Every structure is written in structure tokens, then in C-alpha cells.
Amino acid sequence: MNAENYVASIFLDFGLFFSLEVETDSIQPLLPEGVDLEPSENGKAGLMFNLVHFMEGGDVAQMEACWEIDAGARVELDNKMFPIGPEALSASFLLNVASTSIGYNEECERRSYPMHPRLDLKVVEDEAGFNISDGEGMIARVEHAARDTVFAPYRQAGQDVMVDPLGIVRVNYEIAAEGTQLSLEEVRLILSLEHPFFTRLSLIGAEPKIRKVIFIKPEQRHSVAFFKGDYE
């Protein structure tokens, strides 16, 4: 990467990115002042839930192989602090992140990502999909039937939004991968909204609805590059 604001890249070999929809009232109270939900035509709030497997290694950043889940709210985009580097097309306010790697958790906390306090996340694969759990019980069940999927080049330029003691932090990223959009008949997502991972999100009874699912080609290396904003 030649961009002056380039930070690092990490690599993934599996990803399921869910775009969900919930009632605005369940998400709005979680947002800090200065961060607003992305307007939608039907008055709903956009919620994302991702299951990703990162590979060992990286560029600048070095990490161990691990699974990660994260949840966030779609919010208004702000690219003013990114005069160079890829321009994000969407933004998500991160609400909770969990990983099977203690080192990854510590690095994310250092960079202001909101990490789930438990460090015993487990992702177990079976013939139909994945069970995601920790010592508190099941967090989610993901099933997908995309076995003979045709993949194509996929790029996503997005923005992670967090809060640290000094205020709002925005980090742009760019995913370069092979992927495809799954039909809703090919995938199933069960979220245990009573689990502590979701409790602080106030989603009990919210019944999130899947609107879009992106599937990243398994067993192949894809990259996620991160870019810092100009806060001076």
C-alpha cells in the first residue's frame, strides 16, 4: 500500500457478513452524541453481524489465526478525515466484538474497539454450519447451504466508528476478496438475544430480519487493509 495513512493489513479465509434490520428504538440510545443512524426508507435501523476467520500473519500487523464475531449499527458516513486512501461507502458504529484470540482482543481494545469481556469464545463447525458460544452459552447459530457457489471479485470500502476517551474515532478499511451475495434461502441465522453479547444492545424482542448476506470464499486468502484518519 502506498497511501500515507495506511496502517496495516490482515488476512481472512472465511467470512459471512449479515446486514440486518431492527427497530430504531433498540439502537438509537446506544449511539454517542455526534453519531447518527443512517437514514432508511422504511424507518428501520441497520444492524450488522459478522462471522470471520482471520489467518495467521499480516502486513505490518502480525496476528495468530482466530475467529471473530462483531455487531454494529449502520450510521452516517464521514470521510472528511480521510483526504487520501480509499473513500468509505458505508459506516458502522461497533457495538460489540469477540474473538478466540486473547492477543487480538488486547490489540483491538488498544485501538478503541468495544471488546466483549469474556475470552472463551468458541466457534465449532459441523456439516450444516457453525455454533458460536462462550461460557455463558450459545451466542449464535449460522447455517449456509452455498456449496457450489460461483464467486467473483469483491471489494468493500467501509468505516468503523468507535469512541475513546478523546471522542469519536473513525477507521477506514478496504476488503479485497472473492465473494458473492447469498439468497436468503441459502442462509439461516439464529441470534441468542438474551446472551450477554447482545444484552447491552437492547435487542431482546427486536426480531432482527436479514436483508443481505455476503459470503467470502473459504480456504483462500483475502485481505483487509486499514487506514487512519487525519485528526489534527
Image: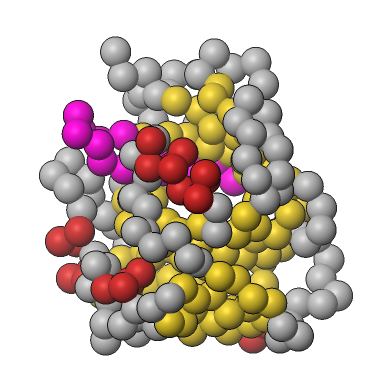
- Given residues 141 and 174, the one toward you in this image is 141
Q: Name which residue lies at 32% across and 62% down.
A: 40
Quick one: quadrant of the C terminus? top left
- In this picture, is 208 found above or below 37? below
What colour scheme has been applied to the protein in the rendered image?
Answer: secondary structure
Position of residue 101 in the picture relative to residue 12 (left or right): left
Q: Name which residue lies at 38% across and 42% down.
A: 109
Q: Position of residue 30 (x, y in %)?
A: 20, 59
Residue 174 painted magenta = no
Position of residue 11 in the picture relative to residue 100 (left or right): right
- In this picture, is 24 found above or below 186? above
Position of residue 202 in the picture relative to residue 156 (left or right): left
Quadrant assignment, res 216: bottom right
Question: Could you tell me if residue 27 is visible in this image?
Answer: yes
Q: Position of residue 132 (x, y in %)?
A: 54, 75
Residue 167 painted magenta = yes
The magenta-colored residue range is 156-169
Q: Position of residue 4 (x, y in %)?
A: 54, 13
Q: Position of residue 112 (x, y in %)?
A: 34, 39
Question: Could you tell me if residue 139 is visible in this image?
Answer: no
Tally of marks: 0
Quadrant assignment, res 20: bottom left
Of helix, strand and loop, which mostly describes the magenta segment? strand
Q: Name which residue lies at 58% across and 80% down.
A: 131
- In this picture, is 230 found above or below 174? above
- Given residues 39 and 59, the one toward you in this image is 59
